[in-house]
Amino acid sequence: MSGALPGSPGALAASMAVYAVTSDGWLARVGDRLEAELAAMIDAGVTAVQFRCRVLPEHDRARLAERVIACARERGALAVVNDDVDLALATGAHAVHLGPGDLPIDVARARVGDRLLIGASAGSAQAARAAVRAGADYLGVGAIHEARPSKPDASPPRGLRVLEEIRAQEETRLVPVVAIGGIDVGSAGACVLAGADGVAVIRALFDAPEPADAARALRRVVVDAQDRRPGARRG
């Protein structure tokens, strides 16, 4: 993952297993420990890291993005920038993630070509279809549970049904999907059983007393749920 983009939907889906979304609080307090803490989380089970920062000045934001993306790439995780296509290109990220209020997916695709993967937020089966038609490579689906304490712009909870609906329709049945929104180790497995390839988390990792231990536990739950899905291959 440190060099080329994932070469297939299957490889991209595998990178969704434990998708860490940085919190403003963690970025503000981590200081010189950023690389060490993030590397420990990746080594323990995090498969993707999204740089998301809303409160710091632009210069600090760009500097931190460079550090997060470089660390993620070096450790073999999918490296994603939230919202900002230019920052994703400048930092060498693998992907940019776009929400409903960001640059339209088709416009972003025209700008970046195949230099970036594009992830898109979707809160319904209809929105998922539209995102895939516009050029999204993967979907962030939610909010599954209540997420507004850590993401004030999150939608009201959608529940697991939205994952099932997206998997039931032909256009989005095989698109990589990461569930997001109030997910923790106790609810991650149900998201995977409902159709997600993995889970995106903020508080469950970055507010944990031992983030690496939290990453390890989340990865274990996700893998166990993947093994329990109908048709799963078992060793």
Image: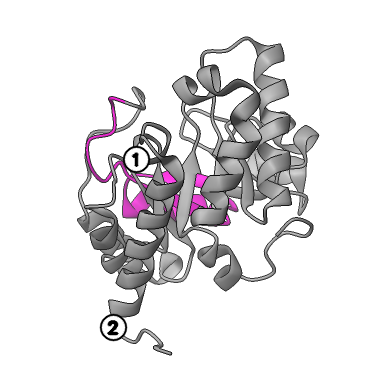
Point 67% across, 52% down: residue:
75
Q: Is residue 96 visible?
A: no
Evaluate if marks 1 and 2 touch, with contact meaning CB atoms under 8 Å apart: no
Would you say 52 lies left or right of 141 here?
A: right
State whether residue 122 is above or below residue 59: below
Disc 2 is placed on an element classified as loop
Q: How many marks?
A: 2
Q: Amino acid at mark 2?
A: Pro
Disc 1 is placed on an element classified as helix
In the image, is residue 142 part of the stretch drawn in magenta? yes
**Which numbered marker is on residue 230?**
2
Q: Residues within 10 Å of mark 2 (few under 14, many from 20)?
A: few
Point 22% across, 45% down: residue:
158
Point 70% across, 60% down: residue:
1
In the image, is residue 223 part of the stretch drawn in magenta? no
Whichever of labels 1 and 2 marks the residue nearer the N terminus, that label is 1
The magenta stretch is 120-149
Residue at mark 1: 204
Residue 164's x, y, as percent?
A: 26, 64
Point 46% across, 46% down: residue:
212
Residue 14's x, y, as percent?
A: 52, 66
State whether residue 113 is above or below residue 190: above
Q: CA distance from mark 1 to mark 2?
A: 27 Å
Residue 177's x, y, as percent?
A: 43, 58
